Amino acid sequence: MASLASSLYDLFSGNPAAGEQAALGSLGTGQTATGEGLVTPSATYYENILSGDPAKIAQSLAPEISMGQQQTEQGKLTSSEFGTRSGGTAAANAAADAANRANLIDLVGGLQSGAAGSAGSLGSSQESLGAGNIGTEAQMAIDRQNQVASDVGGIAQGAAQIA
């Protein structure tokens, strides 16, 4: 009789881990949202760098490009104010522009190499986390189903003992 009562109580009292499952789900939702908020701009940056599209690359590298242009313009201004009035000033200004372009080309090349590795790592990490979460959720459902089956079996056994 005790087994029957215990099984009925277990069956009708619900999932004993419901609070923990809800907390885990809430935590997972928050972590996922935070992760997506951090991953999306990073992924966009990497995609832009890897696209080969000059406009997208320029969009991602806007701060670096702007800084390089400001430095070049500052050098030209200094040269025009304090340099000699010979043809060397024009040549120096042209060389500064070429050096800035070379720096940007080097920057893009280095970033493309790094971005490819980082994007692959980021994608792999996200897949692994997603698979782990799906596995945990599936195991929780299986555990609950097994508990319900055990409770029903206990009820049936208790009823058979009474009869």
Image: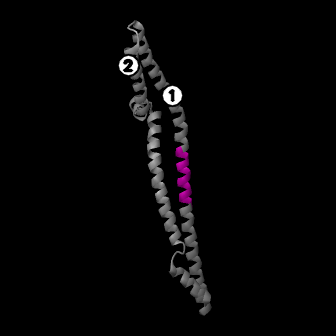
Mark 2, mark 1: which one is toward the viewer? Answer: 2
Q: Residues within 10 Å of mark 2 (few under 14, many from 20)?
A: few
* Mark 1, secondary structure of its residue: helix
Element type at mark 2: helix
Residue beneath label 2, please?
77
Q: Let me know if residue 72 is in the magenta part.
A: no
Task: Tell me if residue 81 comes above or below residue 109 in the rendering.
Answer: above
Out of 75 and 97, give the one closest to the viewer.
75
In the image, farthest residue toward the bottom:
163
The part of the image, by quadrant, that contains residue 16 is bottom right
Q: Nearer the viewer, residue 112 or 123?
A: 112
**Amino acid residing under circle 1:** Gly
Where, by quadrant of the figure, is residue 6 drawn?
bottom right
Q: Amino acid at mark 2?
A: Leu
Residue 44's disc is none
The quarter in which the C terminus is drawn is bottom right
Please tell me which of labels 2 and 1 falls first in the chain. Answer: 2
Q: Is residue 129 magenta?
A: yes
Q: Residue at x 58, y 70 (%)?
A: 143
Q: Residues within 10 Å of mark 1 (few under 14, many from 20)?
A: some
- The residues colored magenta run 122-135
What percent of the width, then of the height, locates residue 35? 48, 51
Q: What separation in Å lies between label 2 and label 1 (alpha carbons)?
A: 29 Å
Look at mark 1 in the image and give the residue it sits on: 109
Instruction: Point out residue 62 in the picture as x, y percentages from the top left corner.
Output: 40, 32
For the stretch drawn in magenta, what is the main secondary structure? helix
The residue at 52%/74% (across/down) is 15
**Residue at image x 42%, y 24%?**
71
Assign the N terminus to one quadrant of the image. bottom right
Instruction: Say if 21 sits above or below 135 in the image.
Output: below
In this rendering, position of residue 9 left or right of residue 93: right
Depicted 2 relative to depicted 34: above or below? below
